[in-house]
Amino acid sequence: MGKQELITIDPRTGVPRATAHRLTRSFLARHGSGLDDLLRRFPSAPGPAFRAAIERTLTSGETTPELEIALEEACDTLLSLRAEDFRPLPVDAGARLNIDAGLRWYAARFRDLAQAARTL
């Protein structure tokens, strides 16, 4: 017997809760501000504009393959930032910066969401 997955339907909308669009919206709602804060250190990638580009693909007219492409591009962009210089913020004074790990963590989550878009 294969792996079984319980599909939960949202009673308000009649749409399964674990769609790629829902997972992405939920991720951005929980972690979007942290992503914005991380990207504020890179002048070439303004955080709110970066997140807005992903959120545009979540509009009702966009398809799941377009979301997958946007998430893969977001992942690639984050990984490319690892080679760029960043500017510390005043709040970073005296703190141990782990910018590289943050970029890799967000890139991995976007890769996971892109995989979900591919399979859901």
Image: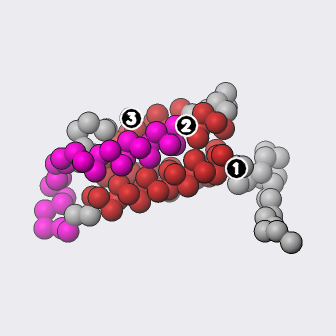
Per the rendering, the mark at residue 49 is 3
Report the magenta residues as a range: 70-96
How far separated are the C-alphas under marks 2 and 1? Answer: 13 Å
Horizontally, residue 119 falls left or right of residue 41, namely: right
Other residues around mark 2 within 10 Å, as few (<14) / some (14–19) / many (≥20): some
How far separated are the C-alphas under marks 3 and 1? Answer: 27 Å
Q: Does the rendering let one see residue 20? A: no
Q: Residue at x 18, y 67 (%)?
A: 95
- State the residue in front, 35 or 91: 35
Secondary element at image label 3:
helix
How far separated are the C-alphas under marks 3 and 2? Answer: 17 Å
| Residue marked by disc 2 | 69
Question: Along the polypeptide, which appears first: circle 3 or circle 1?
Answer: 3
| Residue marked by disc 1 | 119
Q: Please tell me in which quadrant of the rendered image residue 49 appears.
A: top left
Q: Can you say which quadrant of the picture contains the N terminus?
A: bottom right
Amino acid type of the residue tagged 3 in the rendering: Ala
Amino acid type of the residue tagged 1 in the rendering: Thr
Which is in the foreground here, disc 3 or disc 2?
2
Amino acid type of the residue tagged 2 in the rendering: Ile
Secondary element at image label 1:
helix
Asked if the residue under mark 1 is in contact with the one under mark 2, i.e. CB atoms within 8 Å, the reply is: no
